[in-house]
Amino acid sequence: MRVAFVGKGGAGKSAIAGTFARLLARRDGPVLAVDSDPMPGLAFSVGVPVTDAPIPDEAVQERAEGEEGPRFRLREGLTAAEAVQRYAAAGPDGVRFLQFGKLRGSSGGLLRSQFAFRQILSSLPEEGWNVVGDLPGGTRQAFFGWGGYARTILVVVEPTAKSLLSARRLARLATVDPPPDAVVAVANKVREPGDVELVARRTGLEVVASVPWDEALADAERQGRAPIDAAPDSASVAAVASLLDRLGKVS
Amino acid sequence: MRVAVVGKGGSGKTTTSAVVARTLARHGHRVVAVDCDSNPTLGISLGLGADDTERLVARREELDEGESEHAPSWDELIDRFGSDAPDGVRLAVVTRIQNPEPG
């Protein structure tokens, strides 16, 4: 299974993605969790004890003069699967974790890691690897192919005007080339009976999960702990498990 | 006074910006609220409504798609890419919506 979580900042992408990655790993073997936010936060929600894990410079080489292709790529002879084995951090339940690395001052320092990151995701064999991605808040990165590895795009939406508007913009991801198999919504921080219907109507997306507003999840976030560790019996973790059930049946 | 509000996604940048802008305007200052987010939603927090916010974004996208020209001056930029929000705040969407840089 290959999914990417997108949505407005603060909609709850990381908390849901981290929980989803852990549950998927428990059920279905190796999961690569990927954070392409230059202000990364997914590590906390997965429960991986790293806060900054870029792909190191020595794993990347620059395009030679006159050579075709992207400016940076994985060093000659290093396959995507090997790069994951070597550089992705090991997390609980067998989740492997990869990120851009943190933004420091200018964006130039991260370029090599970002190119390698994208190459790993585009060439990692689909056989044997589940991928769960967490994109930065907003629309820009998603529309430039940074979630292109995902068969299913999950738009996390809270029932607020700004989040709904952002999700409506993200719904257009269904029209990119090549299109993903599905773009669907996950309603989050649901408090009112009409919230799910509101998300469906205002975004035009099918709502495949409804995650309730959950104080236990908010506490986990405050503590910087993975929801699945801090609040394993919470309603929000149960809702993410239902999401996994539903996607598992579809694929 | 010129302030810029930054922070991680979801931390409340847009809401804070909007409240600061409208409070300044209510105290008699001329205020331009500049939305530099590639997913612009400041119009909503200012009270402009979703439709007007999307109209501003569409106008900005016409520029990115080469269907209209850049504004030659700051005044014209505020005029062409702006809209009047409550309390006399002028909102302008000035970000490039589509940009291949990651992040």
Image (cartoon, rainbow, N blue to C red):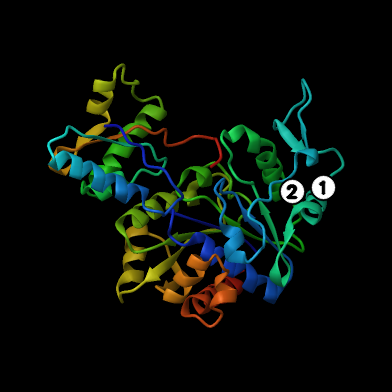
Q: Quadrant of residue B29?
A: top left
Q: Earlier in the sequence, mark 1 or mark 2?
A: 1
Q: Farthest residue toward the top? A: B72
Q: Position of residue A41 (x, y in %)?
A: 56, 56
Q: What's the chain of the residue with tag 1?
A: A
Q: Is mark 1 in CB contact (under 8 Å) with mark 2?
A: yes
Disc 2 marks a residue whose amino acid type is: Ser
Q: Is residue A46 left or right of residue B49?
A: right
Q: Position of residue A56 (x, y in %)?
A: 75, 43
Q: Secondary structure at mark 1?
A: loop
Disc 1 marks a residue whose amino acid type is: Thr
Determine whether A146 is above or below B2 in the image. Answer: below
Q: Farthest residue toward the bottom? A: A233
Q: Secondary structure at mark 2?
A: helix
Q: Which residue is mark 1?
A: A79
Q: Quadrant of residue A95?
A: bottom right
The residue depicted at 25 percent of the width and 27 percent of the height is B78
The residue depicted at 48 percent of the width and 66 percent of the height is A222
Q: Which residue is mark 2?
A: A123
Residue in front for this viewpoint, B73 or B57: B73
Q: Position of residue B49 (x, y in %)?
A: 22, 49
The residue depicted at 16 percent of the width and 39 percent of the height is B25
